[in-house]
């Protein structure tokens, strides 16, 4: 009706008018359209939960899996057909501690695909069990920390906890941002989904199978001894959105309380609080300030204080930017963040920049990219000898590799450039490489152009 045409989608342009027609009004820190869409996502989530239970019931009856043999896991749970089954329908009423243990068991049991319809129904019926007493129970707090500190499975466990509404009922502060939209130029997900996306991105830094996505982040993650510290920071970094005021400061206050209630040590708690409070600063400095200004670097180094804090902030910043939208991250932002990280690390260590070592590291990474795309080892040497040092100082490993790939379009250099000096050779190489290349070179260049740069 408001669109004046056939339109059944709550598109962005119509949300404000639709919200006002329902009587919603803007509040401090939240627009009327955001209130409407939050109610919509809560309703859609409830429908999805009931629909999943219904569909699993139908699937079990059609496939006959309800008659499949059950394997005991422990006193509370069984496994049947790759799904976790509760030992009894009233398990959570008799043993409320088993609610969070469901997701720990899901993490720890090999070959499990999800929760059965019976388990989902039991969790749905146990909503009233998850009150203030449940949240303050020391056993439940210990179980929640164990989920965070497991070696693997955090991404799937927390998504399942959010899907079943257990996460919002245990972390009451998280419940306030479930389904909350962010009407800005960057975020395309609701706040809860954005947080879980950031958690997933941080988790991937610690998985060897994903090392090719963010080589530099994976390299830093190998030196990080407590991944769960970053997981907690990811869970709380945007948890105070929509309240009005600085959500970073409000989030730092919330995570301080969480750390105190869950027995997290002072050093780890201080680091987590710092990451939540400062999670926007590194991105802002990298994109809006002059990174060649020593004062900018020194001021950021003073605020960070130590290499450990710097590394944690860098990993969280990369994960955060990647979690806002599939289109927000690019190589330029990655390069700026990595340059800021390296410059600040040198400032914290008091060491002068070592240009030769930096150039050799870029060359080595470029060789690695070339090898990944079947370029013969050693063929880059002749070209690199003709380029000046400034070329390697100005370009990252991805650019260097792409130059070599494009230069493979022909077996020799045009003679009009070969008789002139190195400076003209470098100029000629760039002009020559900009010309269309043959099919093999095009594939090699395109492959390397899609390869992750050193920051990603």
Image: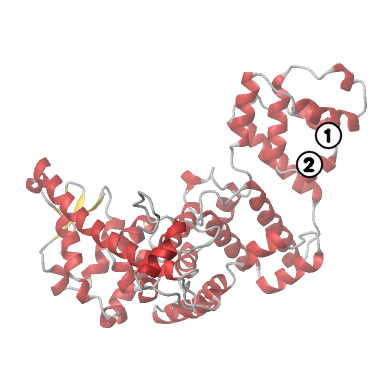
Is 144 located above or below residue 51 in the figure?
below
Lateral position of residue 81 relative to residue 403, left or right:
left
Q: Nearer the viewer, residue 360 or 14?
A: 14
Residue 305 in view (yes/no): no
Residue 289 in view (yes/no): yes
* Residue found at x 81% / y 40%: 391
* Residue found at x 71% / y 69%: 301
The image position of residue 446, as x and y in percent, is 61, 30
* Residue found at x 26% / y 49%: 113
The image position of residue 145, as x and y in percent, is 37, 70
Q: In what element is the residue under mark 1?
A: loop
The image position of residue 54, as x and y in percent, is 16, 53
Circle count: 2
Residue at image mark 1: 387
| The furthest residue to the right | 420
Q: In what element is the residue under mark 2?
A: helix
Label placed on residue 235:
none
The image position of residue 36, as x and y in percent, is 37, 67
Lateral position of residue 207 relative to residue 360, left or right:
left
Find out whether the residues at labels 2 and 1 contact each other: C-beta distance under 8 Å. Answer: yes
Please tell me how crowded label 2 is: few (under 14), some (14-19), or many (20+) other residues with Cα within 10 Å: many
Lateral position of residue 237 relative to residue 162, left or right:
right
Is 367 located above or below residue 30 in the figure?
above
* Residue found at x 78% / y 45%: 394
Please tell me how crowded label 1 is: few (under 14), some (14-19), or many (20+) other residues with Cα within 10 Å: some
Find residue 406 and report its image quarter.
Answer: top right
Residue at image mark 2: 392
Is 310 located above or below residue 27 in the figure?
above
Q: Nearer the viewer, residue 215 or 225?
A: 215
């Amino acid at each position: 009706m408001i669109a004046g045409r056939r339109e059944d989608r709550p598109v962005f342009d119509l949300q404000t008018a639709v919200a006002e027609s329902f009587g919603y009004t803007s509040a401090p820190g939240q627009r009327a359209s955001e209130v409407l869409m939050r109610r919509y996502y809560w309703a859609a989530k409830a429908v999805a939960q009931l629909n999943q239970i219904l569909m699993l019931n139908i699937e079990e009856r059609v496939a006959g899996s309800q008659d499949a043999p059950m394997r005991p896991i422990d006193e509370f749970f069984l496994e049947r057909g790759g799904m976790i089954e509760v030992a009894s329908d009233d398990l959570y009423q008799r043993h409320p501690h088993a609610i969070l243990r469901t997701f720990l068991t899901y993490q720890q049991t090999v070959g499990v695909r999800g929760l059965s319809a019976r388990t989902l129904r039991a969790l749905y019926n146990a909503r009233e069990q998850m009150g203030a007493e449940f949240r303050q129970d020391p056993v439940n707090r210990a179980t929640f920390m164990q989920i965070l500190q497991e070696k693997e499975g955090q991404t799937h466990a927390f998504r399942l906890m959010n899907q079943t509404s257990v996460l919002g009922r245990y972390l009451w502060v998280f419940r306030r941002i479930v389904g909350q939209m962010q009407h800005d130029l960057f975020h395309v997900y609701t706040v809860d989904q954005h947080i879980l996306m950031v958690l997933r991105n941080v988790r991937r830094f610690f998985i060897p199978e994903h090392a090719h996505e963010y080589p530099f982040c994976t390299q830093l993650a190998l030196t990080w001894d407590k991944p769960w510290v970053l997981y907690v920071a990811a869970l709380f970094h945007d948890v105070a959105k929509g309240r009005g005021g600085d959500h970073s400061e409000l989030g730092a206050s919330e995570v301080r309380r969480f750390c105190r209630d869950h027995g997290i040590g002072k050093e780890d708690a201080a680091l987590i609080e710092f990451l939540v409070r400062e999670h926007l600063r590194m991105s802002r400095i990298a994109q809006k300030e002059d990174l060649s200004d020593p004062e900018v670097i020194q001021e950021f180094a003073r605020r960070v204080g130590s290499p450990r804090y710097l590394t944690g902030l860098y990993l969280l910043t990369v994960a955060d930017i990647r979690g806002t939208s599939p289109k927000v991250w690019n190589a330029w932002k990655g390069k700026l963040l990595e340059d800021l990280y390296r410059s600040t690390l040198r400032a914290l260590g008091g060491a002068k920049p070592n240009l030769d070592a930096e150039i050799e590291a870029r060359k080595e990474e470029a060789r690695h990219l070339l090898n990944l795309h079947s370029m013969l080892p050693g063929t880059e040497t002749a070209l690199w000898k003709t380029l000046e040092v400034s070329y390697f100082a100005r370009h990252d490993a991805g650019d260097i590799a792409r130059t070599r790939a494009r230069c493979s379009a022909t077996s020799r250099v045009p003679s009009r450039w070969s008789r002139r000096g190195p400076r003209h050779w470098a100029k000629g190489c760039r002009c020559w490489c900009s010309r269309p290349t043959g099919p093999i070179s095009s594939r090699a260049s395109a492959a390397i152009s899609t390869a992750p740069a050193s920051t990603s």
